Image (cartoon, rainbow, N blue to C red):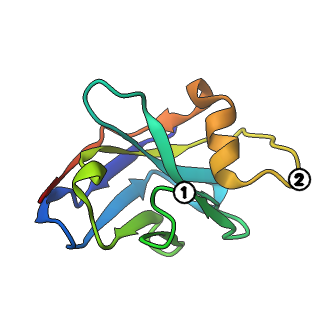
């Protein structure tokens, strides 16, 4: 069973930075496809970053490209999301996601694969990020 545990959320001022962590039960390499989603009140959950854990190939939503970086530490079985230049619109609950059984087409980006059938993803409990202007 896939278990994901997020940490690292908090309150920061606009322009600040945070690093989110997602501890994975078992080998992060075996997760195959992982990423980060976020959801704010009244809005749908959206994917912000994705990564194929075998190749390290990553992709981002346009709203965070250039500001957020997804990465993994295979030794610690941990997924990260470094968020720089945070804006008030980044305020949301952030969720780690994994889909070990995904079978996307060869050229599909990780973030597209995560959103293709989101109900097949496993999610953590979330960590809150609040950005004040």
Q: How far across and how far down the image is residue 79, in percent?
A: 45, 63
Residue that extends furthest to the right in the rendered view of this protein? 106
Q: How far across and how far down the image is residue 31, in percent?
A: 62, 51
Q: Residue at x 30, y 52 (%)?
A: 90
Residue that extends furthest to the front in the rendered view of this protein? 133
The nearer-to-camera label among 2 and 1 is: 1
Any part of residue 32 in sight:
no
Mark 1 Cα-neighbour bin, 10 Å: few <14, some 14–19, many ≥20: few
- Residue 87 lies left or right of residue 68; in this view the side is left
- Residue 6 lies left or right of residue 35; in this view the side is left
Query: Element at badge 1?
Result: loop
- Is 87 located above or below residue 100 in the figure? below
- Residue 77 lies left or right of residue 93; in this view the side is right
- Is 8 located above or below residue 90 in the figure? below
- Residue 14 lies left or right of residue 106; in this view the side is left
Q: Residue at x 42, y 71 (%)?
A: 67
Mark 2 Cα-neighbour bin, 10 Å: few <14, some 14–19, many ≥20: few
User: What residue is disc 2 on?
Assistant: 106
The picture quadrant where one finds residue 56 is bottom right
Query: Element at badge 2?
Result: loop
Q: How far across and how far down the image is residue 82, in percent?
A: 37, 70
User: Which numbered disc, 2 or 1, marks the residue that appears first in the sequence?
Assistant: 1
- Is 32 located above or below residue 74 in the figure? above
Q: How far across and how far down the image is residue 58, in percent?
A: 63, 65
124 or 107, which lies in front?
Answer: 107
10 or 131, which lies in front?
Answer: 131
Q: Residue at x 87, y 45 (%)?
A: 105
User: What residue is disc 1 on?
Assistant: 62
């Amino acid at each position: 069973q896939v278990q994901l545990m997020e940490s690292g959320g908090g309150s920061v001022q606009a322009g600040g930075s945070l690093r989110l962590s997602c501890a994975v039960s078992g080998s992060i390499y075996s997760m195959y496809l992982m990423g980060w989603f976020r959801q704010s009140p009244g809005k749908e959950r959206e994917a912000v970053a994705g990564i194929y854990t075998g190749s390290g190939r990553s992709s981002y939503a346009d709203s965070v490209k250039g500001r957020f970086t997804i990465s993994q530490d295979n030794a610690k079985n941990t997924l990260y999301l470094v968020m720089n230049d945070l804006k008030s619109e980044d305020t949301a609950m952030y969720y780690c996601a994994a889909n070990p059984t995904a079978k996307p087409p060869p050229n599909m980006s990780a973030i597209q694969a995560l959103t293709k059938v989101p109900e097949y993803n496993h999610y953590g409990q979330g960590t809150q990020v609040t950005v004040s202007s």
